[in-house]
Amino acid sequence: MRTISIKKIASLICIPLTVIACHSPADISGKLEGVEKKNIKVYLIEPETLREVAASYFAKAIDSAVVNPDGSFAFYNLPKIKEPVLFQLTVQPSGKAPNHLLTDDPTKSNYMPILWQLGEPLQITAKWSEFQKSFSMEHPSENNKALLSLRDINVKAYQTYLAEKHWQIEDGSQLLEKEHAILQYKTKLINFADSTQHLIPALVALRWVSPESNYERVPEFLVNQCNKWKKKQPNHSWVKQLCKESNPSNLPVLIGDVFPNLKLPMLTKDTLTINNLLGNKLTIIDLWASWCAPCRKENRNVLAPIWNDYHDQGVQIVAYGLESNEASWRAAVKRDGANRWYHASDLQGDDAFFLKKIRVKTIPSNFILDDKGVVIAKNVHGKALIELVKNYITKK
């Protein structure tokens, strides 16, 4: 029998240990499918503020990895941060800015938000041409499971309500139809944010609702998210930023608020207050303009029938026009048969005092008030507005 010295045994044991030590696991690694182009890189983009999440060209790139010919890539030695950090893993061809995010169509988006935790390596796979849509991860954390679930909701909602849809908006005739489809899409993301118990996925959903940070049509969503998270994680910097943005003084009048009792310069040359114009049961405050095609359509096809059917039952309509030309305003009111209800305007166009006080910039818009002047609904148009009025009056 041949005897092996202890020293030689030790050397045999140490060789593989040395090899292993020189090849520690990557912090984040993965493989891209369908890589046919050269000079593709994967970037780690880190948003430093809430507004930088899902916003193209804002968050900073902290690391990059070259995609090998077989599609593999890896990140080593990421920052030693104890708390989980949100990265936007982004793929870019040569020549593109690292933080250029494709945000319009989630089926073609080139980035995916992920939460990385020190000591928990991530391994992912995705298709190069459908990075976000096809993104998958081995053994995701609960936060990353929530982000993947949000991604699935986002893609499905986009495909249902917006993909391959075409509206005639050059003349404004289908502007409200398009806005309704967009709101249906956003509602799916809003529902996710309202129901999830994971902060970062909720905030990603919030940013996907509007990467442009325009929440004029859904301000109640911002307020609800602030109220939810300031109870759970009040010291998180992004929660503080959210609550600052969702301050009611920065937002349009909210559902549940008493509508401001503002003075209005009327078409009749009188000056009246909102409270003096309220209906016995319901009041529609309608924001429109003579030059706004969907507004004119709403006058004829929605507001006129509501007036005919429900005015004698306690429904009032107060229309405020974003006008600068009195003659055009008067002519539109008469032509649409809208001269039966109240009309007001400062004749200051977009610079109107009334719009500034209620913090609205977009038309068509409306507020539906009860007999006390409390806002019970907003921005309801077309058949949905007729049904709302009908149901409200019937129940009363």
Image (cartoon, rainbow, N blue to C red):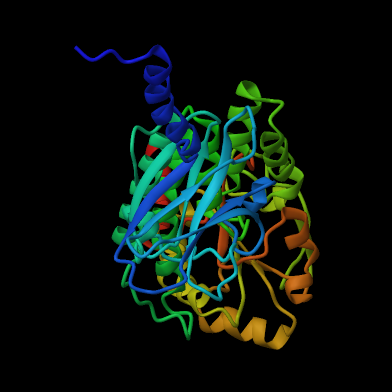
> Which quadrant is home to the N terminus?
top left
Image quarter for residue 351? bottom right
* Residue 135 vs residue 284, the one in the foreground: 135
Can residue 282 be seen by looking at this rendering?
A: no
Quick check: 138 above or below 381? Answer: above
Q: Residue at x 42, y 73 (%)?
A: 38
Q: Residue at x 64, y 33 (%)?
A: 80
Residue at point 45% right, 80% down?
Answer: 169
How many labels were placed on the picture?
A: 0
Vertical placement of 90 versus 168: above or below? Answer: above
Q: Quadrant where the C terminus lies?
A: top left
Asked if residue 185 lies left or right of residue 324, the reply is: left
**Which is nearer the eye, 282 or 80?**
80
Where 378 falls versus 116 (above or below)? below
Q: Position of residue 88 (x, y in %)?
A: 53, 50
User: Is residue 148 visible to the viewer in this orientation of the structure?
Assistant: yes
